[in-house]
Image (cartoon, helix red, strand yellow):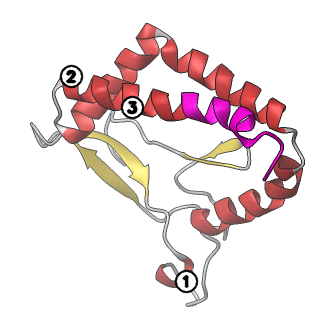
Amino acid sequence: EHSKEPHVMNFINGSFEPVTVSNDDVVSSSSIPLFDPSSNKVLSYVPESHHPSQQMDNDGNESTTALNRAVAAAKQAYPAWSNTPVQSRQRLMLDYAHFLHRKEVREEIAYWITLENGKTTADAMGDVWRGLEVVEAATRVGCDMLGDS
């Protein structure tokens, strides 16, 4: 097992999945190191979530992959989400935008962008602001639709 570097987990159907499971259901057979490009130091490990054609179980059959489970969970959630009023969706995006506006949140996101991509802090913060602008735009979609879709 890897040393002290954190293992990122997939978030599927409302919960985080560990990198491996001790039964026949394979969550991820391996993890991929995420390197700091400036030092080549391992920052963390992310699950290797394969397309089903790329991952087989011990008997040569396609195993249940994190990718398949994520797609299935999204398909299952879609009917309820599609029936959620636009105003409720806007409120969720507005809450998310407010969260992203917190200085410590923006700085932490920029910090990780800097580590993962080797960008300067200023460039990374620009990425954070551009992402925040996308979220803010999503909060206005309902007003722009004017009931037509």
What range is drawn magenta here? 136-149
For label 3, the SS is: helix
- Residue found at the far bottom of this picture: 60
Q: Position of residue 128 (x, y in %)?
A: 37, 27
- Identify which amino acid the numbered label 1 is placed on: Asn
Q: Tell me the distance, in whole angstroms, between the alpha carbons under discs 3 and 1.
A: 45 Å
Q: Tell me the distance, in whole angstroms, between the alpha carbons under discs 2 and 3.
A: 14 Å
Q: Residue 17, relative to residue 129: is it above or below? A: below
Q: Position of residue 56 (x, y in %)?
A: 53, 82
Which residue: 75% across, 58% down?
A: 73
Say which residue label 2 marks: 121
- Residue found at the far top of this picture: 103
Q: Is residue 127 magenta?
A: no
Q: Residue 75, relative to residue 12: is it above or below? A: below
Residue 58, label in figure: 1
Q: Nearer the viewer, mark 3 or mark 1?
A: 3
- Identify which amino acid the numbered label 2 is placed on: Thr
Residue 40, label in figure: none
Q: Are marks 1 and 2 in contact (CB under 8 Å)?
A: no
- Examine the residues drawn in magenta and state their main secondary structure: helix
Alpha-carbon neighbours of circle 2 within 10 Å: few (<14), some, or many (≥20)? some
Alpha-carbon neighbours of circle 3 within 10 Å: few (<14), some, or many (≥20)? few
Which residue: 51% across, 20% down?
A: 100
Q: Position of residue 38 (x, y in %)?
A: 10, 37
Residue 130, label in figure: 3
Q: Residue 104, relative to residue 127: is it above or below? A: above
Q: Are marks 2 and 3 in contact (CB under 8 Å)?
A: no
